[in-house]
Amino acid sequence: MLFGLDAIPLTEPLTGVGRYTLELSRALAIASVSDEFELAYPSRYAPINLSREGQTLSVNLKTARVQVGVLGRRWWLVGLPRYARRRGYALFHGTNYEVPLRAPCPTVLTVHDLSVFTHAETHVARRARRLRLRLPLMARAATLVITPTEAVRREACALLKLDPEKVVAIHEAPRAFFRPIARDEAAATLRRLGVEGDFVLAAGTIEPRKNLQTLVRAFERVARERDGSQTLRLVIVGREGWLTRELRALVANSTARGCISFTGYVSDEDLRALYSSCLAFVAPSIYEGFGLPPLEAAACGAPLIASRIPAHLETLGERASIFFAPTDADELARAIVEIARDETLRQKLSRAAIERAADFKWESTAHRTLEVYARALARVGGEA
């Protein structure tokens, strides 16, 4: 059978949804060698090159840059349904919140999170309005829906008014590339990035939902407690997202601004070096659908500090992280100080993090996704 997947998330520098799309498609192709998988996207986007990720693609996984005209540029309404019919897709998987409303085949929709409903203020207003209008239509049109956690599954059933039988939670996973490396192996990377000594790390697209303001305020408190001989840095990794003015102003006026640095988007090699070398990785988000960076950091042995939100509690478990109330800068500061002072605690958290990350595999994600595909095909076949 030929399965289509949405490749539009791969046309930009890879972050959460792009990583999900790429790793899932690779794992699907390996898990089901008798099937073909095609990552389709319209020609208004520049060509993508999956081999740039440094891995050989399976022969049954290909990309398709679909030439579209005036009508076909309306991709979800005209271009994709027309192409899916011509190619004979058995099923199409919308990996980024969208599927055709009138598809010629069964469809599966991945809903990564519902923050546009639960935390609309953390998004650009126009985008949030658009998603709040479109997502319920897409979810109802899809044959089945996938969420990355049970937490989002419950939200999807409640907020999108979906039958619980229609929604399946399937965890994502850190890539095998992320593993602990020694500090001396990471030294050259850290020097190039200007990171010296002990540092606390945060990673992800810089946007309000990541709650970096609370982290900056907590870091100010920590910096005041340490004398000059114990300088600690805060390193924030990730591309610039949206609504970042308040964060930038907070950092510019912070008493600890000289110890706070932004690296921008970095390569996987750089990220692994940072994960493996940080004193602690902090995930301060007020909301997540899953949260890949904490699990990537865990796979590299980073001691974890995470906000006490449903997705983090579900994915990180009880032993692999210190948790704090998302808006409590004092509680977060105490957690950072505790980890900075206690090497035994750091080692304990590091071991627990590695063990927890090992529970998540893209192979398992792919097999469970294939089960959803089979259910969707049977569901439509049964209705025919």
Image: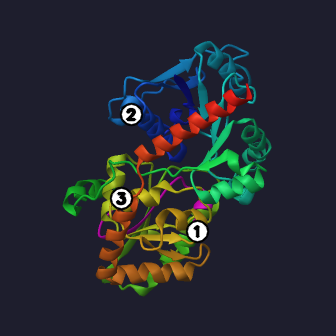
Mark 1 touching mark 3, by CB under 8 A? no
The mark found on residue 305 in the picture is none
> In the rendered structure, which disc, 3 or 2, sits on the residue that comes first in sequence?
2
Residue position for label 3: 299
Precedes in sequence: disc 1 or disc 2: 2
Give the residue at x 43% y 86%.
Answer: 225
Given the image, on which type of amino acid does mark 2 rest?
Answer: Ile
First-in-chain label (1 vs 3): 1
Looking at the rendered structure, the kind of residue marked 1 is Gln
Report the residue at 34% width, 66% height from top.
Answer: 278
| Bounds of the magenta segment | 195-211
* Residue that appears at 45% across and 35% down: 28
Q: Measured from the top left, where is residue 75 in percent x and y? A: 68, 24
Indicate yes or no whether the magenta region holds residue 196. Answer: yes
In the displayed structure, 377 sits above or below 139; it is above
Q: Count every numbered label the image shows and give the total.
A: 3
Report the Cα–Cα distance between label 3 and label 2. Answer: 22 Å
Residue located beneath label 1 in the image: 213
* Mark 1 Cα-neighbour bin, 10 Å: few <14, some 14–19, many ≥20: many
Of residue 273 and residue 118, the one placed in the foreground of this image is 118
How many angstroms separate mark 1 from mark 3 (CA)? 26 Å
In this view of the protein, which residue sits in the foreground, 224 or 215?
215
Q: Secondary structure at mark 3?
A: helix
- Provide the secondary structure element on which disc 1 rests: helix
The residue lying furthest to the front in this view is 382
Mark 3 in CB contact with mark 2 (< 8 angstroms): no
* Mark 3 or 2: the one toward you: 2
User: Which numbered marker is on residue 30?
Assistant: 2
Three-letter amino acid code at disc 3? Ala
Name above or below for residue 203 compared with residue 2: below
